[in-house]
Image (cartoon, rainbow, N blue to C red):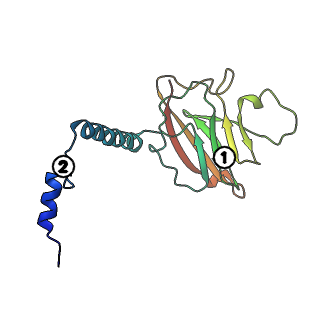
């Protein structure tokens, strides 16, 4: 014989046993909504953050990295400018329309004063590095303005006549 389900429910109800439905507590509901809203705001913050690298995308595989990042907003007036090229490439930097001379860094142990003001090309790392300073072609980056760097680069096996360019800008504070 099957047990009488209705009778068991009545017995539980009269005995003070709940039927499985809980009453929603306003405090728990409020805390849960706060947690959900907080998680949403954190996710939104990460999704909408401006890191500077979305302004200009580097699509040429010959360029591995540039610094300051394209579109950066808080760069110092003496910030080092770096272009990291793929193996087999070399290049020059043009900062705010001024071409900067290049000195090859072969770790010879000697440093000339003229070379200290040039772009340094490290053939082992394929990097071009320039730090604006007094006496250099570009002594400092222009504060309060967008500064533009153009990287002119080519394969080592070719001449500069076959160079390609990549330009990016950033704001100096």
Q: Residue at x 15, y 58 (%)?
A: 11
Horizontal side, residue 67 vs residue 108: left or right: left
Q: Residue at x 77, y 28 (%)?
A: 114
Horizontal side, residue 158 vs residue 54: left or right: right
Q: Number of labelled discs?
A: 2
Q: Position of residue 13 (x, y in %)?
A: 15, 54
User: Which residue of the protein is positioned furthest toward the bottom in this rendering?
Assistant: 1
Q: Residue at x 69, y 21 (%)?
A: 135
Crowding at label 2, few (<14), some or many (≥20) Cα neighbours within 10 Å? Answer: few
Q: Position of residue 121 (x, y in %)?
A: 73, 42
Q: Which mark is residue 156?
A: none
21 is higher (above) or lower (below) than 46: below
Q: Which residue is mark 2?
A: 16
User: Which residue of the protein is positioned furthest toward the top in this rendering?
Assistant: 134
Which image quadrant is residue 26 in? top left
The kind of secondary structure element at disc 1 is strand
Q: Position of residue 74 (x, y in %)?
A: 50, 28
Q: Position of residue 3 (x, y in %)?
A: 17, 72
Q: Which residue is mark 1?
A: 91
168 is higher (above) or lower (below) than 136: below
Which image quadrant is residue 112 in? top right
Quadrant where the image shows the N terminus: bottom left
Whichever of callouts 2 and 1 sits on the residue coming sooner in the sequence is 2
In this rendered view, identify the residue nearer to me: 126 or 15. Answer: 15
Which image quadrant is residue 83 in? top right
Report how far apart the C-alphas of labels 2 and 1 lie in the structure: 84 Å
Camera-near label (2 vs 1) is 2
Crowding at label 1, few (<14), some or many (≥20) Cα neighbours within 10 Å? Answer: many
29 is higher (above) or lower (below) than 145: below
The kind of secondary structure element at disc 2 is loop
């Amino acid at each position: 014989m099957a047990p009488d389900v209705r009778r068991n429910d009545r017995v539980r109800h009269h005995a003070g046993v709940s039927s499985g439905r809980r009453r929603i507590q306003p405090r728990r509901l409020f805390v849960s909504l706060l947690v959900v809203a907080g998680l949403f705001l954190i996710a939104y913050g990460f999704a909408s953050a401006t890191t500077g690298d979305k302004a200009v995308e580097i699509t040429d595989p010959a360029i591995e990295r540039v610094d300051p990042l394209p579109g950066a907003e808080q760069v110092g007036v003496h910030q080092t400018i770096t272009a990291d090229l793929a193996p087999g490439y070399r290049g020059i930097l043009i900062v705010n329309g001024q071409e900067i001379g290049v000195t090859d860094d072969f770790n010879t142990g000697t440093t000339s004063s003229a070379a200290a003001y040039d772009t340094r090309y490290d053939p082992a790392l394929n990097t071009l590095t320039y730090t604006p300073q007094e006496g250099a072609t570009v002594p400092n980056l222009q504060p309060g303005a967008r500064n533009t760097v153009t990287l002119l680069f080519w394969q080592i096996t070719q001449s500069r006549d076959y160079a390609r360019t990549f330009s990016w800008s950033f704001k100096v504070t």
